[in-house]
Image (tube, grey):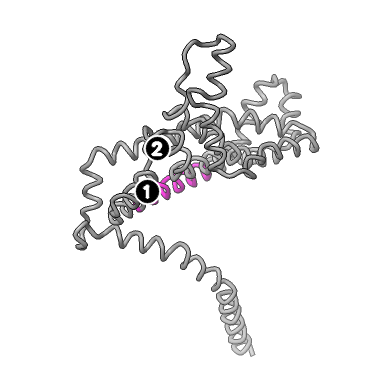
Amino acid sequence: MTALHAAELRRDEAREKWMLFGLAAPAAALVVAVIIVPVGWLFWLSLFNDAGELSADNYARMLASKSYTRIFTTTFKVSLLTTALCVLLGYPLAYFLAQLPRRWAALGMMAVLLPFWTSLLVRTYAWLVVLQRKGLINQWGMELGLWDAPLRLAHNLNGTLIGMAHIMLPFLVLPLYAAMKAIDADYIRAAANLGAAPASAFRHVFFPLSLPGLFAGVTIVFVLCLGFFVTPAVLGGGKVIMVSMKIETLVDLFFNFGTASALGVVLLALTLLVLFAAHKLLRLDKVLGGGA
């Protein structure tokens, strides 16, 4: 009787596994069709040189050429600076929203999400109108006597950072605000009751508890910046060349799909490396007790 019961349990377990596999099969097929196959095809194209021969010339060219090194350096530099600007602007904003009453916080979050309702291209060209030599900022500044000559705010790194920080800011504020709202206010009250000043309570209690949201927002912003195209292409004025722009040039002008694919594969590998490092940091943060 026991052996028969064990056999029935095994059959039920196998049946349950097949049912779960059947439920997951459509999602798995979608992942394979949308992610695995395109990435595999991208990697396959990167293994062919200009003559159509199977080789690693595209990757060797990237290692030997200093121009590709500068492009990747610029990409990571712009991504890091944009992330830093978003942290400087987004952390105080998220903290301010987290301290507001629910109704006012909802209105504030609506203002944060409002740019999502406008096209990325429209927002970028709006910044170009504001930042260019005859734009609103330069005109107002010279009329008020703040400076005599137009400032170089567009078609350079400055304009690129301003536009990208504006576009990426909500991606930092949203997870950071969620993490801050999850922090129990009793922790701050307990620190105050134990004699901690407001600044000390914030530094030793609130800030460590908000780190998971901050790390999540930083990771999202940095990874999205690695593949940015429209904003640096418009506001950079051709002086800020990122990997995505180089890929577009190789495909559109030179029809060099092999080198473009190799750039895409390397950028994907670096992005996965960043995500892996972020995962390790988040796990370390939870081990140290910083999780909200």
Horizontal side of residue 203 vs 234, given as left or right: right
Q: Nearer the viewer, residue 51 or 85?
A: 51
Q: Nearer the viewer, residue 271 or 164?
A: 164
Name the residue at 46% across, 62% down.
35
Q: Which numbered disc, 1 or 2, marks the residue that appears first in the sequence?
A: 2
Image spot of residue 200 (x, y percent): 65, 22
- Please tell me in which quadrant of the rendered image residue 156 appears: top left
Task: Tell me the number on the disc at residue 76.
Answer: 2
Magenta range is 265-284
- Please tell me in which quadrant of the rendered image residue 92 appears: top right
Q: Which amino acid lies under the numbered mark 1 shown in the image of this protein?
A: Glu
Q: Residues within 10 Å of mark 1 (few under 14, many from 20)?
A: some
Name the residue at 66% across, 26% down.
202
Taking the magenta stretch, the answer to whether it contains residue 273 is yes
Secondary element under disc 2, as helix, strand or loop, is: helix
Horizontal side of residue 187 vs 60, given as left or right: right
Q: Which amino acid lies under the numbered mark 2 shown in the image of this protein?
A: Phe
Name the residue at 64% across, 45% down.
117
Quick check: 39 above or below 2?
A: above
The residue under label 1 is: 248
